[in-house]
Amino acid sequence: MTQPPLAQAVPADLALALARRSDRLGRLGSSLLFFSTVGSTNDVAAALAEEGGHEGAVVIANAQTAGRGRHGRTWFSPPANGLYVSVVLTPGRARPAERAVSLLTLAAGVSLAEAIDAATGLRVDIKWPNDLLVGRRKLGGVLAEAVATHGGSPSVESVVLGYGLNVGVAVYPPHLRQRATSVEAELGREVDRAALCAETLATLARRYDDLLDGRFDAILDGWRARAPGHVGARVWWTTPRGTESGITSGLDSMGALLVRVGDRIERIVGGEVVWE
């Protein structure tokens, strides 16, 4: 069996940036593991989550060799170039638990968009359910994975929330060059990666509190304000009946995407949605 990597000391600039936001981190940062290189921060966080009692634990890496996004896609994670972060959360503690869990990814997306804006001044849009965009280019994404806690019940199972943000100007693989961008590429200047990382955690902590305290409408309103395509955009998706298309008509209270197809409304909760 492959041994897990050994965590290292948190870099001084990141430690200072976190200390400056300590009053805003709330439940997050109860423990923090930092790695210069790791396969996947989500895998390390999942191992913690399986043990139980690690709500708020944060895993950060300078690089990933096996980072992943939705649908098993690889997440390009070059050294010292992006943010690669995973957090152990327990949204099922909220009431109603089903709604809190279903809105977690949206809460993460809006918090990351808010953090990037606050730390750098870059305005970022959100595309359902979890893509961060500037124009039509992808800046970041969110991946939430449920983890069964040993001896726990489904109502309090942990969720590992991982996110990746492109920060520095990178040489992307050919299949990403026309689709990806970064904070520095959009701003035309360097940014403080440690400060941005700390701000993402502080903003996520606030939105996680919204979730646990049942302020679901605040999350949905914040998401809608940064997601221009959630109304009036043409989308395609695959069903057992074949490919369908329609016009987006907003979100419902559970965060599902509503799409008008002819005279009916389809409710999309997952899968691959292609946007025009």
Image (cartoon, rainbow, N blue to C red):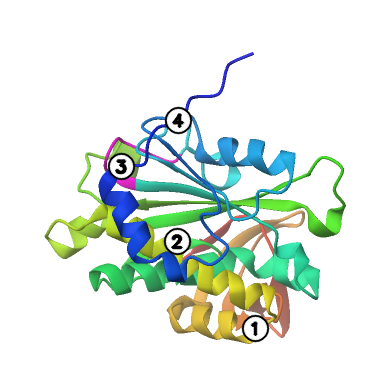
The image shows residue 29, relative to residue 134, as above or below, that is above
For the residue carrying disc 1, how many other residues have a C-alpha within 10 Å: few (<14), some (14-19), or many (20+)?
Answer: some
The span picked out in magenta is: 75-82
Could you tell me which residue is drawn at 20 percent across and 62 percent down? 186
Could you tell me which residue is drawn at 54 percent across and 86 percent down? 221
Left or right of residue 197, residue 101 in this image: right
Badge 3 or badge 4: first in the primary sequence: 3
Residue 215 is labelled as 1
Residue 241 is labelled as none
Instruction: Measure how far apart labels 3 and 1 are at the Cα level.
Output: 35 Å
Q: Amino acid type of disc 3? A: Pro
Badge 2 or badge 1: first in the primary sequence: 2
Q: Are marks 2 and 1 in contact (CB under 8 Å)?
A: no
Q: Amino acid type of disc 2? A: Leu
Left or right of residue 70, residue 22 in this image: left
Front: mark 2 or 4: 2
Magenta-colored stretch includes residue 81: yes
- Residue corresponding to mark 4: 38
Residue 11 is labelled as 3
Q: Amino acid type of disc 4? A: Val
Left or right of residue 173, residue 190 in this image: left
Secondary structure at badge 1 equals: loop
- Residue corresponding to mark 2: 201
